[in-house]
Image (cartoon, helix red, strand yellow):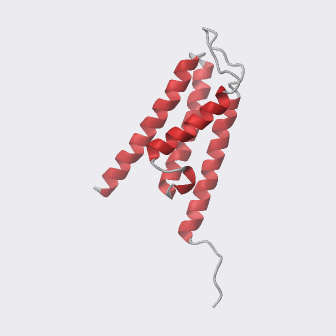
Amino acid sequence: MSKSTALTVAGQAQQLALASEVEAHRALTLVVTSLAGYQDPTGDGPKADSLKGIMISVSRRITLRYGHKVQEMPTPMLRHVMNLKYALRDLLQVLVAQQAQYKQLKESLWKTIDDHANEYWRMNNDATA
């Protein structure tokens, strides 16, 4: 018997979820990159390496709050993180349009990650109860 190399249905769903998460990550990265040169009304804004640092911090906080690296997340969690990253992108766009303080931009990102992770775990616990 020859071994099939076809992905299982679950494997296909996982690969699709990973691909979708990658697109959401790219969308967020584009908005974060556009912060280059941003200054709030007080003159504060990202320094040269801050934008890369924001993306690293986002990834670390997501890993910490969800308990898995993105590549190791189960499919439902990946979908939730994908929606989170789009929410982060949208939030940044709104805050930049409002000329929010740079400190508020970052704090809002961290709070949104925490809120989404709490929502995920609350839904997950409710489903298993």
Rendered location of residue 47, percent (x, y) = 67, 21
Q: Which residue is farthest top?
A: 42
For image coordinates 50% across by 38% down, the residue present is 61
In the displayed structure, 93 sits above or below 121; it is above
Q: Quadrant of residue 57?
A: top right
Rendered location of residue 3, percent (x, y) = 63, 83
In the displayed structure, 103 sits above or below 55; it is above
For image coordinates 68% across by 19% down, the residue present is 38
In the displayed structure, 12 sits above or below 2; it is above
- The one nearer the camera, 73 or 91, is 73
126 displayed left or right of 50: left
Image quarter where the N terminus lies is bottom right
Q: Quadrant of residue 15?
A: bottom right
For image coordinates 64% across by 48% down, the residue present is 22
Rendered location of residue 59, percent (x, y) = 56, 41
Q: Which residue is farthest left?
A: 129
